[in-house]
Amino acid sequence: MFVPIILGSDKTTVSVATGHTQYWPVYLSIGNIHNNVRRAHQNGLVLLGFLAIPKGQCQKFLVYYMYLCSH
Amino acid sequence: MVRHFTHLYDYSNKRLIISQGIPCDKDGNAVPQGTPPLPRETDNGPEDWTPYNDRSQFELADYIFTKNQTSAGGIDELLNIWAATLVGTDLEPPFLDHSDLYSTIDSTPLGDVIWESFTLKYQGELPDGDIPPWMETKHEVWFRDPRILVHNLLANTDFDHKIDISPFQEYDANDNHRYQNFMSGNWHGNKRFVFIIYLFSKNYMY
């Protein structure tokens, strides 16, 4: 079976109850689901994870860069 | 409306794949149309309280953590009294201490997929002079297993008849290519797309 993975993130940051930490949510969906269902059905788009947001000049690539450095 | 399945060229085996989305079992053997899906593997019935030993252990955790919101010290005190009442028997209190309780709660599968985390820290050379704060802090990333998430999406019965199992092309009476959903896109002959399939085609069933 062919399952295209769709990943997305928005700039909305989430502060957890403790206050100081902010995360960047990453969403996941699959291309098999019909477009109108993916938009309307809340389970069509699921939460895959929260990225850390290091404070830096180029935040977009920083997480990935650190991931590479950690291996 | 005419609909036919997208032909894909399998570069590794030099043959044409026609993905038709035929229902099959986990070994890839075709099953008759209309065969009901198997129950979910994680559905072990109402008596399964994993990771709790039994119902009362779950209810205690729920009471302490959710309803009463007992402090860590309070939990330890309660469990110490509990343990004292069991001295001389083979029995143990439901939890050893507050960290045992917390780790049990943390390992509870939520919506069948557990949250996992890892911590990153910059390990390269530090610059002379001012060190940017991100180089010295630890950064936490939380995630859930994407494979299980996709399995759950595919297993969701709400999407019955609202899901396309294989890529296809659709034409109206005037032979106009009709695009509507992701899988009816113009994948035919798209080498980049076919190559992506090739990369992941170890378990590709068609």
Image: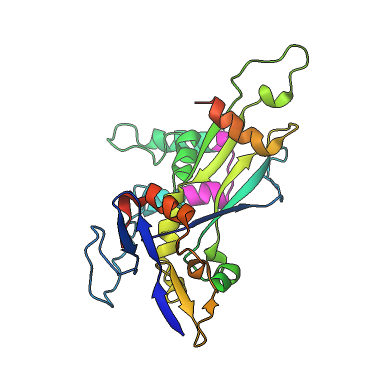
| Residue at image location 28% in from the left, 78% down from the top | B34
Q: Is residue B23 magenta?
A: no
The answer, for residue A21, to whether it is visible in the render is no
The answer, for residue B17, to whether it is visible in the render is yes
Image location of residue A40, percent across then percent down: 59, 71
Query: Image check: B82 left or right of B123?
Result: left
Q: Residue furthest top?
A: B128
Q: Nearer the viewer, residue B157 or B55?
A: B157
Residue numbers of the magenta segment: B61-74
Query: Image check: B100 left or right of B34?
Result: right
Query: Image check: A10 left or right of B149?
Result: right
Locate residue B6: give its quadrant.
Answer: bottom left
The quadrant of the image that shows the C terminus of chain B is: bottom left
Q: Is residue B64 magenta?
A: yes
Q: Nearer the viewer, residue B33 or B140?
A: B33
Locate residue B140: give its quadrant.
Answer: top right
Locate residue B27: give its quadrant.
Answer: bottom left
- Compared with B33, B111 (above or below) is above
| Residue at image location 27% in from the left, 77% down from the top | B33
- Compared with B113, B102 (above or below) is above
Please tell me whether the stretch drawn in magenta is mainly helix, strand or loop.
Answer: helix
| Residue at image location 47% in from the left, 77% down from the top | B170
